[in-house]
Amino acid sequence: MPGAPSWYAASARGVRARPRLEGRIVADACVIGGGYTGLSAALHLAERGYDVVLLEAEQVGWGAAGRNGGQVGSGQRRDEGELTQRFGLEMARRLWMLGEEAKALVRERVARHAIDCDPRNGQLITAARAADAVALRRRPERLARDFGYDAMRWIPPGELPAMLASRIFHGALLDAGALHLHPLNYALGLALAAEAAGVRIFEHSAALGYAPGAPLTVRTGTGEVAARCLVLGCDGYLGRLEPRIAAHIMPINNFIVATAPLGAAGARALIRDDVCVHDTRFVVNYFRLTADHRLLFGGGENYRRGFPPDIAAFVRPYLLRVFPQLAGVGIDYAWGGALGISRTRLPHLGRLGANVYFAQGFSGHGISIGSLAGQLIAEAVAGETGRFDLMARLPAPAWPGGTLLRWPLLVLGMLYYALRDRL
Ligand SMILES: Cc1cc2nc3c(=O)[nH]c(=O)nc-3n(C[C@H](O)[C@H](O)[C@H](O)COP(=O)(O)OP(=O)(O)OC[C@H]3O[C@@H](n4cnc5c(N)ncnc54)[C@H](O)[C@@H]3O)c2cc1C
């Protein structure tokens, strides 16, 4: 079973057993990490004619790619207003357009490789507080005027209950241009496409370290890869592999449950149009229906190294706050995963020396931006550095305290904001 004991693992399609790396092999490019970043980089590189080896410590999709909420939002993780304030309108437009390209890339990959991952359109962004509603209401006009995006509209509080069977929200934005999908099946489909393009994928082959150079050498427990360039796509699972980038992201644990099947009518009674939903809280609640009519609900996170012993009991209060009518419904699956959060919530792309590329810190927006990051890395390896450099120039400050002290400082900060959610 790939990944965690999740509903995704239980409904996975395209699972393959892949060999462990044994002995020494040579390639043009070595990619570490079988999530969206690594798989997308490997696929794009192979399509450009590079001989690519991908090393995955566990199985393809074992990391956040196989555990996440499956929501593919528009633009970047930071909204266009925040981007404009921080970088000016022109740069905000370029970043927004890259985010849109990332979303289109996901759709294009799913279509081109016939990836069986139940893609469905539409996302509601619900206002958790009245003040959030004021900010959300401004977005459709600004997006249409300054960003040429006209797929968002405001749903007033009075109209929302017909679309979403919850009374706690102060209206919502409906983004018809966003989508949701089965994230593990998307990753598994990318892996099959990469292999069809010639990528050699090794599982249970954790990279233990690498010696820089040209070629550089990546070492696993049972083999090594000599390659002209290296791609690091490990995000929240990077560990100690590359200390120079570790302090720039904070791995945070986030949790999801899947209810017992509710039946087609029961499921649609909760979310009429089968769109995905997330709210505006700092610790976001996010939810959607599955193809077999369950509610998949993400809520709550922790800032420790381990998961709570009973994840279902941990998430249930968040679920019941949104849908108290589900008090008697069972929870069939509960799981968690780690995602890399950057301080700016913008992705952290870059290069170490001449031939080591990395992308991480997608901060909850990694299905699309991770997929795009893989493409940008492949472009940069091929010498087309413009778009990669644009993203690599984004500020990516290290978390205070570096790799050693970032945890206690983060816990303090996060608890403060989580407390504000409750007030
Ligand atoms: C609970 C949860 C909900 C989320 N919800 C959403 C959502 O709704 N929408 C969205 O866009 N994003 C969401 N995210 C974030 C998204 O899943 C990540 O941004 C995305 O998966 C990052 O992709 P990645 O390939 O960079 O890293 P990952 O998918 O985490 O993959 C990294 C891989 O690297 C491997 N690895 C690490 N170290 C090594 C090593 N030394 N050697 C070999 N392999 C190694 C790991 O085993 C892992 O498989 C969520 C994340 C979580 C945890």
Image: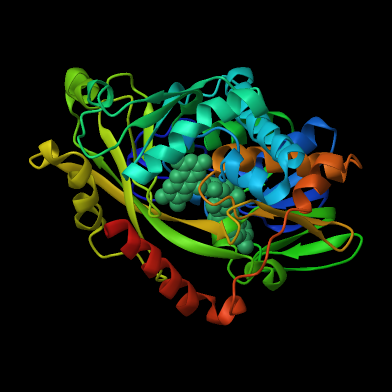
Q: In which quarter of the image is residue 10?
A: top left
Q: Residue at x 28, y 29 (%)?
A: 157
Q: Which residue is drawn at 92% across and 61% down?
A: 214
Provide residue 25's location: percent of width, then percent of height: 79, 54
Q: In which quarter of the image is residue 99?
A: top right
Provide residue 168's location: percent of width, then percent of height: 22, 40
Q: In this view, does 408 lie above or below 379?
A: below
Provide residue 213's location: percent of width, then percent of height: 89, 65
From the viewer's perspective, tell me whether residue 78 is left or right of residue 294: right
Relative to the observer, which residue lies in front, 381 or 25? 381
Image quadrant containing the C terminus: bottom left
Relative to the observer, which residue lies in front, 25 or 364? 364
Q: Which residue is drawn at 33% across and 24% down?
A: 291
Q: In which quarter of the image is residue 387?
A: top right
Q: Residue at x 62, y 43 (%)?
A: 370
From the viewer's perspective, tell me whether residue 265 is left or right of residue 220: left
Q: Is residue 76 above or below residue 235?
A: above
According to the image, what is the colour scheme of the structure? rainbow
Image quadrant containing the N terminus: top left
One can see residue 57 in this view: no
Q: How many labels does the image show?
A: 0
Furthest residue to the left?
A: 328
